[in-house]
């Protein structure tokens, strides 16, 4: 352990505080870099990334709409099983359809149903 400790005494660790506690146990204190983004900056970057316009899979969209026509009370989990994609994939597809004013959710999450506003 001491060998790896000594080996890592390079320039990238020059501002760190190293302290051996007992035997091969040591404490390494690394000061925060001023270039580390804050939590709010990270949230902003994540939001920008998630708002990208990825193309909708037309085949999946059509399948979702057909299922909703047959069963407006269908859940995301059921849609995921039928379409063969993840529940998060279904959530994304449904959000895209809602943003385009093609569908809307009426009522609560548990007892609500889907309505098709306009055919695609």
Image (spheres, rainbow, N blue to C red):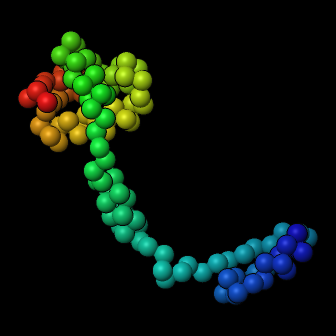
Residue 41 can be seen in this image? yes
Residue that protrudes farthest toward the front in the picture: 59
Q: Is residue 35 above or below residue 73?
A: below
Q: Quadrant of the C terminus?
A: top left
Q: Quadrant of the N terminus?
A: bottom right
Residue at point 33%, 52% (across, down):
50
| 34 relative to 52 in the view: left or right | right
Residue 67, quarter of picture: top left
| 70 relative to 79 in the view: left or right | left
Q: Is residue 46 above or below residue 73?
A: below
Q: Is residue 18 above or below residue 50?
A: below
| 12 relative to 48 in the view: left or right | right
Q: Position of residue 86 (x, y in %)?
A: 42, 31
Residue at point 40%, 65% (across, down):
42
Residue that protrudes farthest toward the top in the picture: 70
Residue 2, quarter of picture: bottom right
Q: Position of residue 118 (x, y in %)?
A: 8, 29
Residue that protrudes farthest toward the left in the picture: 118
Q: Is residue 22 above or below residue 106?
A: below
Residue at point 85%, 72% (across, down):
4
Residue at point 78%, 83% (across, down):
9
| 113 relative to 84 in the view: left or right | left
Q: Nearer the viewer, residue 19 or 40?
A: 40
Residue 16 can be seen in this image? no
Q: Position of residue 38 (x, y in %)?
A: 41, 71
Residue 73, quarter of picture: top left
How many marks are shown on the rendered structure? 0
Q: Position of residue 80 (x, y in %)?
A: 38, 25
């Amino acid at each position: 352990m001491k060998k790896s400790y000594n080996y890592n005494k390079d320039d990238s660790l020059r501002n760190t505080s190293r302290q051996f506690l007992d035997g091969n146990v040591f404490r390494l204190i690394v000061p925060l870099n001023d270039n580390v983004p804050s939590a709010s900056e990270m949230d902003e970057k994540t939001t920008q990334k998630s708002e990208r316009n990825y193309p909708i899979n037309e085949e999946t969209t059509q399948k979702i709409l057909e299922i909703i026509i047959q069963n407006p009370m269908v859940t995301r989990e059921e849609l995921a099983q039928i379409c063969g994609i993840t529940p998060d994939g279904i959530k994304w597809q449904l959000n895209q359809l809602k943003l385009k004013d093609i569908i809307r959710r009426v009522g609560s999450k548990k007892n609500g149903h889907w309505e098709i506003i306009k055919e695609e």
